[in-house]
């Protein structure tokens, strides 16, 4: 992007009529950086508007709507309307017409996307957040398109997919039918396309596609997966490139805005590290009172079985670090528990377990102080044989979950509602309800980090105690 | 030679002999070179020395340096890591180096079957529970070959109770962690940790081709497993089984199954009862595949996902000696899987004795035939031992790899 515009340079006629190919379609791959000049005010406005858009996308999922479900979409559209983000609302509605309004909307979409690329290329965390939101936005627009709009998109972006020949489909008929997740009524009429399996990883992951000799056979409705994975790859690549250009971008007019964009008026919900050191004597009672279910589970296993597998250890370690347990105290706790295990003597402990503790505190190995895992990370983690980590609302059997929650003293109504959310895939909602059940009040913002759960719980209980006095 | 004869205390004088006379250096070097010596040079090979001293990020410029270091340091364990962009030994302290290539590897450990096997536990293994490994090999091999098109799989006995698989196709070695993760999730059917009873879920009416293939293999063994493992042989096992079944169906299934005496009878009653329920439409839609789900839960391979996903993850090298059992971690051919007996794998002590036996025998032959002027044939030491067949398996694997490599080179030449 050319950011070398003069301070008060005015360009009144920005492309409306001679709109470049970028603005011909609601759904854009954002291939070429825009080269037009814009007012500084407009620049800021666009940046903030897109940030609002991406925040709304995030919120919709945080509210428990399954991504791309009808609820998810309608929540987003309502919010866009509420916030007066008409241009984005237009693009989310799939008109794909060619009026002046359409061009304006697409242009705003295009330029604001690029502004945020510059803002979000700065760190791994920012990049990941941005890419995920942009993918959601891309797919939201894409799903709103008619068949015509879809074909036009393929054509404009040079996507040439040739369907497999009817006799090939006939031959593979049974496998294609059993291994593809599409409604029966669409099966006979849909075309299938043969692509390398590496282009449709989300389908491979979910075993929702027929694979043969390294190729995936996907129905028309799954072409979006291919397109998204290309969009993701090119976006990731571009963000890394932008990041390497950053030192050369020295513009005090926008520098500050871009640097701090992610954190402005957005109510960032991540937790704060506890400032006070935690007294290890309180740990057991804290665990009972304030730990979220995932962490109290790990803590109990550590205390009763004197062992945890690697990811369980890591998860609990970082959590404890986050709530203010010092390296020394953590090491002591670890040593006490692990050496109670008949298979681990103090020698084995020093060799096999002490390292991870020091490593997590940034005192060994790469010397990076790692941050505690967020709900997202915990939810996404693989839980295997003999492992206790992961989000209980996701990994536990509903029956077991119900039993455990009841044991924890939650009322039957609350338990039913929590199990329902968990079974519906709304793990964080379930956890938030659990919080509410435990402390009689909802947390200030819905739970998305175990350490946030902890600090909110501590705060609430303290406030209540103070009121009593 | 049985492994009972092996005494771990002898390792310190057996290993030097093994490394100096028996380890198949040239084949090993050929393997990790993949037609280009720089692949070998940039490969992380780490050692574990006696007394649990780990040396990571080593690399070796050629076969001679590798052999020299093995003979000098006498590691009790050799691990293979990734190929890096630069030689791992030249990396500067506290700087990260990035892995660029690595075989896709799988590690299946008998330990992870403890909840379904009743013949042995922990480190032990017998022909009964080895069947789980046979099933695992066949299912993985089928999926890797037919679904992903991977041809060059090196199967290795881990030395005690598990197996490793190294997928060495060029395309496989190059894929990033994202692809590995997707591939592993595709293959990983058994989900969930300790607090989950029902760990396989096949919702809907249709069953994926890859799962159908796995079920076909499992069906060949399942009845035998039911009997040999006596899967309902105790109150506890029976209850664990019932926990898998949805509460609504559990009661009637339990009552019906109680009529059976043996595990085989109980299983067959379960099958007919469930089929009956299906016919009467008494089964909710998402549980229609319960029978299949249960078979998979009992017999589908349990994969250690993290080993397969991380490119920089280390895995024990073939031809390592297991420090507890003394068994050699030998490659085996998938075609001879049914005959493979983990309790009969050659041990370091055994093969060293093989050399002596061979020499005594050949002397006797010489004496008998009295052909003193016959030229002494040059025989490599490992050819005198029971390690030979494993090395032949390895060589055949290398030949196939070589063939493919050469034909793809020619393909490039034409372009």
Image (cartoon, rainbow, N blue to C red):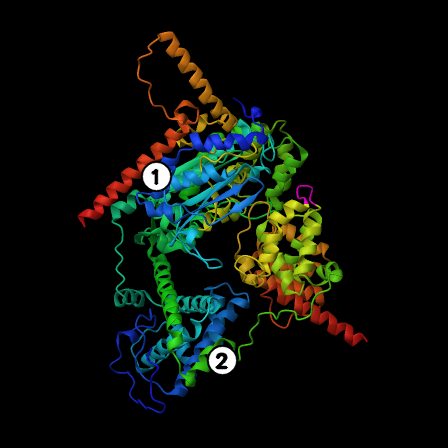
**B189 lies left or right of A250:** right
Q: Is residue A39 above or below residue A294?
A: below
**A299 lies left or right of A2:** right
Q: Label 1, on which residue?
A: B30
Residue B164 visible to an observer of this rendering:
no
Task: Locate residue A106, reporting x and y percent.
Answer: 34, 77
Q: In which quarter of the image is residue A162?
A: bottom left
SS under mark 2: helix
Q: Residue at x 52, y 48 (%)?
A: B286
Task: Locate residue A53, reporting x and y percent.
Answer: 45, 75
**A312 lies left or right of B34:** right
Structural crowding at the residue carrying mark 2, measured as other residues with C-alpha within 10 Å and reported as few (<14), some (14–19) or many (≥20): few
Magenta stretch, overall SS: loop
From this viewpoint, which residue is outermost toward the front? B373
Range shown magenta: A341-345
Task: Locate residue B222, reporting x and y percent.
Answer: 51, 31
Residue A355 visible to an observer of this rendering:
yes
Please report, as a chain letter, where disc 1 is located: B
Asked if residue A343 lies in the magenta stretch, the reply is: yes
Q: In which quarter of the image is residue B254?
A: top right
Q: Is residue A395 above or below residue A158?
A: above
Number of the label disc, if any, that sits on residue A82:
2
Instruction: Please name which of the two marks, 1 or 2, marks the residue nearer to the observer.
Output: 1
Q: Residue at x 33, y 83 (%)?
A: A4
Asked if residue B114 lies in the magenta stretch, the reply is: no
Real-space Cα separation, disc 1 to disc 2, in angstroms:
66 Å
SS under mark 1: helix
Q: In this view, does B131 lie above or below A428?
A: above
């Amino acid at each position: 992007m050319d950011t070398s515009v003069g301070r008060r340079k005015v360009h009144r006629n920005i492309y409306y009529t001679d709109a470049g190919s970028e603005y011909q379609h609601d759904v854009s791959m954002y291939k070429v950086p825009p080269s037009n000049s814009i007012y500084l005010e407009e620049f800021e406005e666009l940046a903030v508007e897109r940030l609002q858009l991406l925040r709304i996308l995030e919120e919709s999922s945080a509210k428990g709507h399954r991504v791309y479900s009808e609820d998810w979409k309608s929540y987003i559209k309502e919010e866009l309307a509420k916030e007066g983000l008409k241009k984005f609302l237009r693009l989310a509605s799939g008109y794909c017409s060619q009026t002046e309004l359409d061009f304006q909307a697409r242009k705003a979409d295009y330029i604001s996307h690029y502004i945020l690329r510059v803002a979000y290329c700065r760190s791994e965390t920012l990049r990941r957040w941005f890419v995920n939101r942009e993918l959601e936005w891309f797919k939201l627009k894409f799903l709103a398109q008619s068949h015509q709009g879809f074909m036009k998109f393929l054509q404009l972006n040079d996507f040439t997919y040739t369907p497999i020949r009817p006799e090939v489909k006939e031959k593979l008929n049974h496998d294609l039918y059993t291994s593809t997740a599409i409604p029966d009524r669409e099966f006979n009429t849909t075309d299938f396309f043969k692509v390398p399996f590496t282009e449709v990883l989300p389908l491979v992951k979910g075993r929702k596609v027929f694979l043969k000799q390294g190729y995936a056979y996907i129905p028309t409705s799954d072409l979006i997966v291919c397109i998204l994975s290309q969009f993701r790859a090119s976006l990731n690549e571009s963000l890394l490139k932008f990041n390497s250009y950053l030192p050369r971008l020295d513009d005090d007019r926008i520098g500050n805005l871009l640097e701090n964009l992610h954190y402005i008026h957005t109510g960032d919900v991540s937790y704060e590290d506890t400032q006070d050191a935690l007294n290890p004597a309180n740990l057991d009672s804290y665990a009972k009172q304030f730990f979220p279910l995932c962490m109290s589970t790990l803590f109990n296993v550590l205390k009763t079985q004197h062992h945890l597998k690697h990811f369980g250890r890591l998860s609990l370690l970082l959590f404890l670090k986050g709530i203010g347990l010092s390296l020394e105290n953590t090491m002591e706790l670890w040593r006490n528990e692990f050496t109670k295990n008949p298979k681990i003597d103090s020698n084995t402990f020093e060799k096999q377990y002490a390292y991870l503790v020091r490593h997590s505190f940034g005192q060994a190995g790469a010397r990076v102080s790692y941050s505690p895992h967020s709900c997202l990370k915990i939810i996404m983690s693989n839980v295997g044989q003999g492992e206790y980590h992961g989000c209980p609302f996701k990994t536990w059997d509903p029956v077991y979950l119900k039993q455990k929650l009841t044991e924890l003293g939650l009322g039957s109504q609350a338990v039913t509602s929590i199990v329902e959310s968990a079974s519906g895939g709304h793990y964080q909602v379930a956890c938030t309800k659990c919080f509410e059940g435990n402390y009689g009040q909802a947390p200030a913002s819905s739970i998305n980090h175990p350490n946030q759960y902890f600090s909110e719980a501590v705060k609430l209980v303290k406030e209540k105690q103070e009121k009593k006095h | 030679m049985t492994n009972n004869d092996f005494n771990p205390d002898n390792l310190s004088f057996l290993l030097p002999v093994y490394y100096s006379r028996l380890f198949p250096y040239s084949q090993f070097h050929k393997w990790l070179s993949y037609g280009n010596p720089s692949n070998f040079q940039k490969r992380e090979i780490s050692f574990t020395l006696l007394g649990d001293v780990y040396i990571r990020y080593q690399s070796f410029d050629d076969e001679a340096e590798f052999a020299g270091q093995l003979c000098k340091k006498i590691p009790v364990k050799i691990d293979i890591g990734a190929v890096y962009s630069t030689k791992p030994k030249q990396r500067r302290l506290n700087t990260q180096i990035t892995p660029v290539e690595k075989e896709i590897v799988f590690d299946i450990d008998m330990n992870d079957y403890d909840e379904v096997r009743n013949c042995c536990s922990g480190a032990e293994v017998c022909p009964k529970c080895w069947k789980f490994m046979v099933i695992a090999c066949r299912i993985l091999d089928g999926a890797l070959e037919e679904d992903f098109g991977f041809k060059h799989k090196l199967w290795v006995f881990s030395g005690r109770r598990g197996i490793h698989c190294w997928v060495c196709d060029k395309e496989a070695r190059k894929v990033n962690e994202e692809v590995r993760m997707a591939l592993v999730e595709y293959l990983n059917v058994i989900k969930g940790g300790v607090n989950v009873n029902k760990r396989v879920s096949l919702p809907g009416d249709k069953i994926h081709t890859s799962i159908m293939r796995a079920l076909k293999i499992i069906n060949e063994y399942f009845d035998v497993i039911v009997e040999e493992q006596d899967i309902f042989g105790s109150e506890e096992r029976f209850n664990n089984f019932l926990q898998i079944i949805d509460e609504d169906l559990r009661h009637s299934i339990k009552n019906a199954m109680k009529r059976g005496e043996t595990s085989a009878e109980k299983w067959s009653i379960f099958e007919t009862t469930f089929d009956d329920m299906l016919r009467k439409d008494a089964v909710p839609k998402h549980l229609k595949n319960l029978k299949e789900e249960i078979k998979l839960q009992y017999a589908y391979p349990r994969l250690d996902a993290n080993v397969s996903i991380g490119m920089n993850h280390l895995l024990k090298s073939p031809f390592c000696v297991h420090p507890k059992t003394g068994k050699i971690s030998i490659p085996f051919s998938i075609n001879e899987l049914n005959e493979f007996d983990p309790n009969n794998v050659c041990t370091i002590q055994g093969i060293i004795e093989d050399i002596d036996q061979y020499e005594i025998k050949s002397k006797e032959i010489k004496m008998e035939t009295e052909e003193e002027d016959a030229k002494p044939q040059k025989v490599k030491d490992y050819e005198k031992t029971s390690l030979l067949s494993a090395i032949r398996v390895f060589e055949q694997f290398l030949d196939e790899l070589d063939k493919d490599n050469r034909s793809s080179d020619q393909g490039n030449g034409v372009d």
